[in-house]
Image (spheres, rainbow, N blue to C red):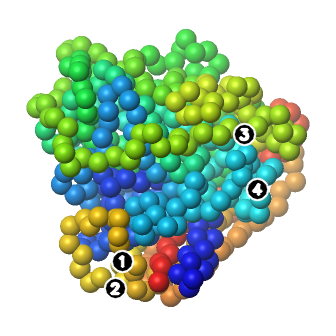
Amino acid sequence: MTLKLLALSSLALLTNAHMAAYHKAMYCFNGTVAGQVNYNNDDPVSPLWMLQKNDYWFHHFNGCDEFPPAPGDFLELPAGSSFTVEVAANRGVTSLSFNGQFATEWGDGQNHPEDYSIANLAGAPLSGSDCIGSPNMHTQNQSMAAGTAFAISYQSELSEVTIDNLVVFTVRYNTPWKRITSYDVPKDMPACPADGCTCAWVWIPDGCGEPNIYMQGFKCMVTGATSTTPLATPKPPVWCEEDQSTCTQGAKQILIWNQAEGNNIAVSGFDLSGNAKSPAYNSKCGFKDGAQNDIFGTSSSAAAPPAAIASSPSSATSLSSSASASSSSAVASSSPAVSSYPSPSSPASSPASSSKISSSAVASSAVSSYPSPSSSPASSSKISSSAAGSSAVSSYPSPSSPSSPASSSTISSSAAASAASPPSCETSTSTMFITSTVQPPAVATTPRSSDPATSQSANNLVATAISSSSSVTPTGHKTCRKRMVHKPVRRRFLFK
């Protein structure tokens, strides 16, 4: 009972934590402290904003890319079928820690209604930007979730993966949403080299806070391959919501946006719903829902043909592809309570069949343009967390029966709002710091300077002007909408 009460109290502190895809084949599965297993690992969830390429690439800024999965652990990608991961704010609320006793349908370890939305929070908190606050999925309801994706490189060594050989091969519309999330694999995917491929889970939220990106790495292996056709060299996606004929055709790169260097897309203005444009893994940038079956080329256009073909490793593991998908329930568009945030006209009952996001799925009164935060959230120095009760844990133990850590760790978070306010609407300053400490922090953070310069160059896209107030921005509909900034939060909780 004591453990249960402590867990519930700790999980309540996950409100502003972000999301990551969890699987034992992920990089920094056990955290980022050598020789220790962090069953409450949230190192991969930190958003990436205004970083140098060597820092955002595969989440290097906090060392996540320096902790590969155990030898033989692969995320299996069955050609022509699907695979499953757990999208959550913390490993502790997945089936991969504590025998899954704190896992629920949702990525925060709590229970929420099927038609969860800002109009039906059922007691859950609202975020500072008037979006769902727990888990922090950066959305007002399911229909407005921007979409997540997986990309693959036929390079076994992470150091050999580049933007030119990393190809988006599957997309799931209306995610992140529930914890169990399934993705479809093209049937013509060729086999990986003997040492496996490298995969990345990527996501760009559509508003509800800071305009950042997410990227984390996996060791992966295509299974059941029957084709030897290589993937084509990917091209940068473009914004094409207004005219789908202008979308990048064929294999596409992952989206790099709002970083200090290496950006491959730039947007300005408003989308068809009247909100600030935000690149996303959906039809707005030419991505179809499900398997991307147009990514194959010829030997002369291949991104990276496999050097040696591998059979399915007996030790490779993946969650059951028959598990319920993340978008198993859509927000009911007929509900008057959510009329200001309508769902698509024909919401899918499963992610594999979810329909293309239409402009009507995003209400014109949702969110406005992005303010620029005063400092880079992802630039804090690496946060180390030791799994108490274990001085040195070798290799990667099975998560089926972990022992609970014996000591508590520091839980701290902050959220701040910043933007320049236009003259046509009232502006109020709102700064909120939320800190919950079990033990005084022993981690020093190194602030990162921000360049307030603005550029529309796709290779040098930086933030807009920086200030310290929240803003209310006018739109073409003569309404004012508030956009708050979420800082990355380091959420830690341990169970006794």
Measure the alpha-carbon separation of dots 3 and 4. Answer: 12 Å
Q: Residue at x 86, y 44 (%)?
A: 337
Label 1 vs 2, first from the N-terminus: 2
Measure the alpha-carbon separation of dots 4 and 1. Answer: 34 Å
Secondary structure beneath dot 3 equals loop
Check contact, mark 1 vs mark 2: CB within 8 A.
yes
Give how far across and how far down residue 460 sits, in percent: 46, 39
Picture layout, residue 326 above or below residue 67: above
**Residue linked to disc 2:** 389
Secondary structure beneath dot 1 equals loop
Measure the alpha-carbon separation of dots 3 and 1. Answer: 38 Å
**Residue linked to disc 3:** 331
Label 4 vs 2, first from the N-terminus: 4
Res 201 visible: no
Secondary structure beneath dot 2 equals loop
Label 3 vs 4, first from the N-terminus: 4
Callout 2, which amino acid? Gly
Label 2 vs 3, first from the N-terminus: 3
The residue most toward the left is: 308
Q: Residue 227 falls in which quadrant of the image?
A: top left
Measure the alpha-carbon separation of dots 2 and 3. Answer: 44 Å
Q: Nearer the viewer, mark 4 or mark 1?
A: 1
Label 4 vs 1, first from the N-terminus: 4
**Residue linked to disc 4:** 121
Give how far across and how far down residue 442 sits, in percent: 43, 84
Give how far across and how far down residue 162 sits, in percent: 28, 38
**Residue linked to disc 1:** 403
Secondary structure beneath dot 4 equals loop
- Binning the other alpha carbons within 10 Å of mark 4 as few (below 14), some (14 to 19) or many (20 upward) gives some
Q: Residue at x 37, y 59 (%)?
A: 61
